[in-house]
Amino acid sequence: MIDTSNGTTYDFEARHMIEALRSGVPSRAVGACFSEARPKIMKELSAQLDQVCEHQKSGGKIISGKYGEGKTHLLNTIFNMASSNNMVVSYVSLSKETPMDKLYLFYQKVIQNTYLPRRQQPGFMHEVENISPGSPVANEMLLYAAKHLETDKLYYLLRSYLNTEDADEKFILQADMEGDFIANAPLKKIYRRIFGQPAKYNVNFTKTKHCSDYFHFMSHLFVQMGYQGWVILVDETELMGRLGKKARLNAYRNMASFLLPELCPESTFTLFALSASYSEDVIEGKHEYENLEAAFPEQPEPIRTVLNLLNDAEQLLPLTRNEINEVLLKIQDFHGLAYGWTPNLSADTLAKSTQSGGYLLRTKIRAAIEFLDQLYQYGKVGKTVINELGEETFEEDGEIPFIEDL
């Protein structure tokens, strides 16, 4: 908050909120302040986070929704909820650079976009750097890496990382944990230099086959660091539909590792958001069940289960009138704080201002903000006039036409 020279008080956090809503780009700040809508699904998701925090039960969920109906906003709300519960959160959107069919590239982007609780910037390696050799966390992670993963590469990597004093080696080994995987030969060379003995893998590590080890390793590490679990949020999941047939099937197989409790990393909850049309456009339109039968006639699982989950994904329904009114009234409050005025409009008046904005929640919000902008700048829009007390009156003359796009 700052006071201008004329005594008007502006709340820059509120202004940031209004500008984010005006642009239609969801943000974590918006998710934190508009979390009351859709109480049913929020209650379900909160219960699933509690299962992770209190009982270390992993799992995942898929939600679907039409464009502009609040999928990304919901993910941002869950981001804030998880962060306030002392959980590590990762947030990614699928793309060519973040493909679900190539788990090693997906891992790299997830780690790059991982936030410790209540942190505004991603990153956690500074905490890994503070782990000292022989500490309880170090000993537990070395035991876990040696005994509970498909390969034991991460045992040799972590042991080398904890014991090297060479800055270049430290950088290379840290980069590996962040997804820039080091080849087996250089790692074995580093290990031999430090300990004077060879590194003998039980299984030769290949990033295309064994990247799931890294997700399990990191999830265990976060728990050992004292966090309540790991939440992975994946937006624009429908972009899997642009992949080729074989790549899509591989993407579904990778999704199973985050959706099926028996395959999930420790204390992890993953939420995928995708377009409501995915089932019709991709699963039906591209004959995914037939593709599965042709490719894996004897071993259709777990891909078949993931296809079923995609078909049965819970769809975000349009907000009720009361829920929309609550959102609009909160927007009015933020607009007043942002620009130092008090509109005091009724929910009905705000709702009427959004009728030209179509049926999408995003466009309704933008229409309401444009309406409030004009009232703030000109004192009236159409028949709605703001008097000196900031309250609404209605007049027949002096109309200002409603502007669709400011």
Image (spheres, rainbow, N blue to C red):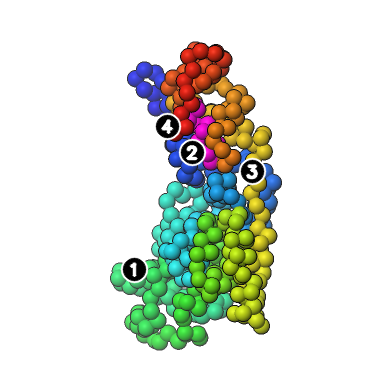
Mark 1 burial class by Cα count in 10 Å: few <14, some 14-19, many 20+: few
Task: Name the residue rendered at 30%, 71% in the picture.
Answer: 168
For residue 192, say whether it is visible. Answer: yes
Label disc, if present, on residue 406 of the rendered structure: 4
In percent of width and height, residue 10 lies at: 42, 27
Q: Measure the alpha-carbon separation of dots 2 and 4.
A: 14 Å
Task: Name the residue rendered at 67%, 66% in the picture.
Answer: 308
| Quarter the C terminus occupies | top left
Answer whether residue 369 is magenta in the image. yes
Residue position marked by numbered label 3 in the rendering: 318
- The mark that comes first in sequence, 2 or 4, is 2
Name the kind of residue labelled 1 in the image: Phe
In percent of width and height, residue 302 lies at: 64, 73
The magenta segment is 362-372
Q: Check disc 1 and report its element: helix, strand or loop.
A: helix
In percent of width and height, residue 286 lies at: 58, 68
Q: Measure the alpha-carbon separation of dots 2 and 3.
A: 18 Å
Residue position marked by numbered label 1 in the rendering: 171
- The mark that comes first in sequence, 3 or 1, is 1
